[in-house]
Image (tube, grey):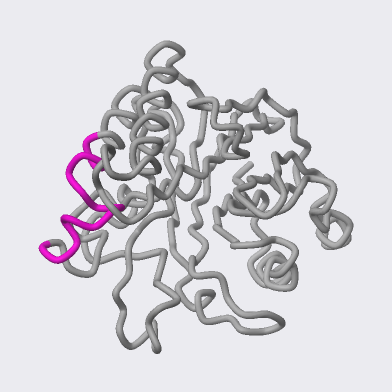
Amino acid sequence: MPFTLATWNINSVRLRAGLVERLLTEEAPDVLCLQECKCPVDKIPAEQFAALGYPHLVARGQKGYNGVAILSKLPLEEVDGRDLVQLGHARHVAAKLPNGVTVHNFYVPAGGDEPDREKNVKFGQKLDYLTEMRDWFAAERPERAILVGDLNIAPREDDVWDHKKMVKIVSHTPVEVDHLTAVQEAGGWVDVTRKDIPEGLLYSWWSYRAKDWDAADKGRRLDHVWATPDIADAAHSSRILRPVRGWDTPSKPSDHAPVFATFDL
């Protein structure tokens, strides 16, 4: 049976629970992966989501920061999450679907503002996190798996609004792109979004700093859907729901838009 999966950095699941409900009602993905939930697991409004047909939840949380969750119509078997670089951050959660597919949901560190690990500890943490992801997938090459999340890197020139202006900005620097590419190659991951939409500018994040984000359109593709080669050909219908970035009812929007893909498995 086909199933549709979405990934979305919600930027506080409690503050924006109404937006999550709206997405679940209007788009009805079978699985929704959330990042930056910003609350302990017991504070996630799970009952609200269960009432909409999403009774299954696996999550890692912490107060005020980070946090990842998988909501599902389908039963989930929780898989051990990884605390990479031993940061003590809730940045990874994983679960297995009834068809045997494992879904990994990541929130990679943003990396601060200065792309220099000597001057900026957060940038070093980001690179180290990606290195441990690479080493993990090289040692335990995944099969029948999907990796989604806010990976906080826009790898391609057409994943940012202006490559020349962005090449020295955290999220698009060559060293970050190289690290992400190494993660992808170690696991054999296929970028499902770009498999389906191979050409053209494509964004999933627009800064809150822009007075009119839509008109300025200075976006970046930070949110990704990857799959292992054994199931990548079953993926199709990838899309980024840009209008969701503008949803302001019943709360102000996240600065990210959700990314969707359907798998015939």
**Please, which residue is most extreme toward the left here?**
164
- Residue drawn at x 47%, y 20% as measured from the top left: 142
Residue closest to the eye, 189 or 12: 12
**Relative to 255, is 216 above or below?**
below
Residue 126 position in % (x across, y down): 38, 39
Residue closest to the eye, 88 or 204: 88
Residue 211 position in % (x across, y down): 40, 88
Question: How many callouts does the rendering have?
Answer: 0
Residue 56 position in % (x across, y down): 80, 44
Highlighted range, magenta: 164-178
Residue closest to the eye, 70 or 193: 70
- Residue drawn at x 64%, y 57% as measured from the top left: 29
Quadrant into which the N terminus falls: top right
- Residue drawn at x 35%, y 65% as measured from the top left: 203
Does 31 lie within the magenta span?
no
Q: Quadrant of residue 238?
A: bottom left
**Please, which residue is most extreme toward the front here?**
119
Q: Is residue 145 left or right of residue 184?
A: right
Q: Quadrant of residue 119?
A: top left
**Please, which residue is most extreme toward the top here?**
139
- Residue drawn at x 29%, y 27% as measured from the top left: 185
Q: Quadrant of residue 190?
A: top left
Q: Is residue 255 left or right of residue 161?
A: right
**Relative to 187, is 45 above or below?**
below
Residue 88 position in % (x across, y down): 61, 32
